[in-house]
């Protein structure tokens, strides 16, 4: 009698190398995986070691992976004797801080363990609200430009969430088109009431994007594109928005020492870029990858504007047609 095929799928939120794991009962039986891989968990009978397969892997044999509980415990344990068994993949609560800028001072010990996230296949149905598309970019990615271009090409299908601002309206602008123009008092009140997914100051004026602005795009059955600071991801990852997160980073030449001025990446679009600039851009991409990579569905490496636009367009088209992995909590 056949075993029922397991329906439990987990997105790995950490890299796992059995050959480096001193705790494993059998290194050869371990299943290596990378953060972002989808694992089909075949058996959870053992509390410490699950049996799992990698989805999309031709290798049909299941291997051992640390259970969620075991991985969490390994992370939580202080590194006694200077030799912790499990690598630490922790995010502190300060990363969850919303754009309201309020820090959760009370929960310094409250950390989130990045182990596994249970996921399921999801395909948007024709009568369903389109998924929210969230762009985050590292230094030099210029995601706003990218977003605007893709929308301009197809304004019936894609739209931005109209931001709020406290700056005065210019004569060619229309309320509710470029911005919602509001007073400082109104803006502050909305910010207090957590109406914004993010906001910031620019030349002494406040700018921010509200949750309602996203909803009103989706109500028109258009796909809403937002570009935000990665800190906002946490608040956006809800069943309502089912965000698809695209991390855009510029393609950069390999780091070279003893060179002060480099040719610009992206076919000259950036103008003259120094090695220091490049280093900053690499660092920015690295930091986002480290801190937020587990919340990213897709990395888009931007060579130049035109090819990045084409790639983004094709991702958006597939988003409406194909099946994607999403957290189980989004579809229950
Ligand atoms: P402008 O006043 O020229 O329309 O916009 C100036 C700047 O305001 C933009 O370049 C951008 O940096 C910032 N800005 C516009 N919309 C938003 C928004 O929704 N959130 C934040 N944080 N900044 C924005």
Image (spheres, helix red, strand yellow):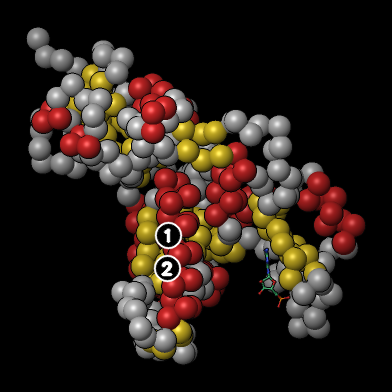
Name the residue nearer the viewer: 313 or 274: 274
Q: Is residue 152 above or below residue 99?
A: below
Name the residue nearer the viewer: 223 or 196: 196
* Residue 157 showing in the rendered view: no
Residue ID at (51%, 56%):
134
Q: Position of residue 151 (x, y in %)?
A: 51, 70
**180 displayed left or right of 189:** left
* Residue 17 showing in the rendered view: yes
**78 displayed left or right of 322:** right
Residue ID at (58%, 59%):
228
Give the Cα distance between marks 1 and 2: 6 Å
Q: In this figure, what is the number of numbered marks?
A: 2
**94 displayed left or right of 53:** right
Q: Position of residue 76 (x, y in %)?
A: 46, 27
Q: Which residue is mark 2?
A: 282
In contact (CB < 8 Å): disc 1 and disc 2: yes
Element marked by disc 2:
helix
**36 displayed left or right of 141:** left
Element marked by disc 1:
helix
Q: Position of residue 238 (x, y in %)?
A: 55, 39
Q: Is residue 243 above or below residue 47?
A: below
Residue ID at (46%, 90%):
272
């Amino acid at each position: 009698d056949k075993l029922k095929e397991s329906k439990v799928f987990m997105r790995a939120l950490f890299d796992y190398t059995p050959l480096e794991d001193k705790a494993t009962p059998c290194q050869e039986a371990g299943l290596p995986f990378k953060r972002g891989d989808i694992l089909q968990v075949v058996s959870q009978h053992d509390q410490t070691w699950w049996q799992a397969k990698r989805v999309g892997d031709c290798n049909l044999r299941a291997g051992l992976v640390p259970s969620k509980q075991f991985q969490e415990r390994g992370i939580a344990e202080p590194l006694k004797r200077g030799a912790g068994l499990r690598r630490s993949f922790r995010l502190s609560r300060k990363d969850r801080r919303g754009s309201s800028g309020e820090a959760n001072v009370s929960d310094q010990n409250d950390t989130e363990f990045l182990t596994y996230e249970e996921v399921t296949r999801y395909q948007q149905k024709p009568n369903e609200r389109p998924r929210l598309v969230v762009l985050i970019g590292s230094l030099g990615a210029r995601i706003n430009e990218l977003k605007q271009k893709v929308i301009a090409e197809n304004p019936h299908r894609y739209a931005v969430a109209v931001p709020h601002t406290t700056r005065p309206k210019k004569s060619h602008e229309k309320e509710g088109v470029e911005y919602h123009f509001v007073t400082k008092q109104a803006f502050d009140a909305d910010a207090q009431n957590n109406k914004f997914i993010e906001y910031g100051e620019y030349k002494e004026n406040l700018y921010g994007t509200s949750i309602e602005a996203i909803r009103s795009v989706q109500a028109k059955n258009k796909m809403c594109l937002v570009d935000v600071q990665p800190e906002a991801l946490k608040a956006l990852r809800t069943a309502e928005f089912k965000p698809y997160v695209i991390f855009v980073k510029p393609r950069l030449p390999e780091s070279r020492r003893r060179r002060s001025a480099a040719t610009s990446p992206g076919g000259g679009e950036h103008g003259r870029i120094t090695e220091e600039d490049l280093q900053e851009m690499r660092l920015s991409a690295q930091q986002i990858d480290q801190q937020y990579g587990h919340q990213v569905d897709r990395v888009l490496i931007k060579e130049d504007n035109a090819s990045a636009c084409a790639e983004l367009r094709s991702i958006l088209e597939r988003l409406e047609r194909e099946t994607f992995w999403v957290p189980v909590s989004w579809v229950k």
